[in-house]
Image (cartoon, rainbow, N blue to C red):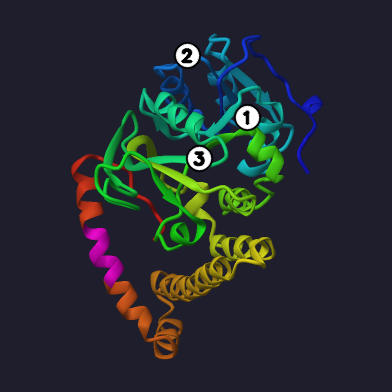
Amino acid sequence: MTDSPSKFQERGADEVPDVSVIMSAFNAQRTVAAAIGSVLRQSCARFELLVVDDASTDRTVSVVQSFEDPRVRLLTRDRNEGPGPCRDAAISLARGRWVTFLDADDIYEEHRLEAMLRVANAHPADIIVDDIVDCHDSGATLVPWRRVWDERRFGPSGASIREVDLVRLLAEDRLLVKPMMSRELILRSGATHGTSRNGEDLAFLFALFASGAVIRYVPIPTYLYRMTPNSLSTSNPDRHRLYRDVFAQARPLFAADPRALDAIDLRLSQLSRMQVYLDWFGALRQRRWAGVAKSAWTHPWVLAEFAKRVASRLPFHAHRIIHGGARRTIE
């Protein structure tokens, strides 16, 4: 359940913003200042930044409070519940016509909000997303690795805006998007992130898609994603089960759409297969050789999957080492 506003401590400005940027933060004292700074440097000025501290035990709150800009609004929670409830609570307090998100360890390029607002104003009933750049976490700065999507994705090169429906999105290897949408669309669809600590962003998108919205993809890389070691999105050993739960719970929303159901079911199958691989890989890392052999005998495809992953990760690790990026400890 979303906490009521009375459970928050808040400070903010009186000016009505064009867009509300929502940031959930937990023990983010190392990165949150850079994230906030990237919002304050935006080329459009009419925004508010709602930072929701999820009961941090470090100096996150004091770092946020050090910013005296009245566009920064600090909300503090009494207990840690994960990013989903934080975002939903902030949405209920947001004043902007448009809503978008920034993780506390990521960064915006300075023209992101201006570019996204231009498209959002032309397509107010849809979800606007830009391209995301994977970046090595090198401490003081972010080192770009590569774009999640690219200029050629979802349409002809040179097209400024491309339409992406749910089925097309679910065909992607990665479902990482940081959307901008109207607050009215969120309220009308009843979209929430729920309480899952993995896949909460997908639960939110499913509800928006079910209301008839589509993604409008703007092929410009303006969101810098920090590949943080031991981040919440990758360190949870139960994350694939949680993702499967999110997909399974979305099926009733698309009962009248066979294409969407097929795409969801395919993703569920892929997640189940991935869990088999991760169980095998976990046994390999722990040198439980009997389990490794038994799983490889039952599922021989895990060996080919392992070889494919090793080959694909070599360029990543070479680039990371050259540029001093931190090592991610999970596969």
**What segment carries the magenta color?**
308-314
The kind of residue tagged 1 is Val
Report the disc number at residue 45.
Answer: 2
Residues 224 and 61: in front is 224
Q: Position of residue 283 (x, y in %)?
A: 44, 74
146 left or right of 37? left
Q: Quadrant of residue 302?
A: bottom left
Judging by the rendered image, the residue that carries numbered circle 1 is 52
User: Which label lies toward us, 2 or 1?
Assistant: 2
Residue 302 sits above or below residue 71 on the image: below
Judged from the image, the secondary structure of the residue bearing numbered disc 1 is: strand
Q: Which residue is mark 3?
A: 179
Element type at mark 3: loop
Q: Majority secondary structure of the magenta segment? A: helix
- State whether residue 92 appears in this view: yes
- Looking at this view, name the residue that lies furthest to the front: 122
Residue displayed at 51% across by 57% down: 166
Q: CA distance from mark 1 to mark 3?
A: 18 Å
Marking on residue 31: none
Instruction: Tell me the amino acid under the disc marked 3.
Output: Pro
Residue at 39% x, 28% y: name it.
Answer: 115
Q: Earlier in the sequence, mark 1 or mark 3?
A: 1
| Badge 2 amino acid | Ala
24 shown above or below 253: above
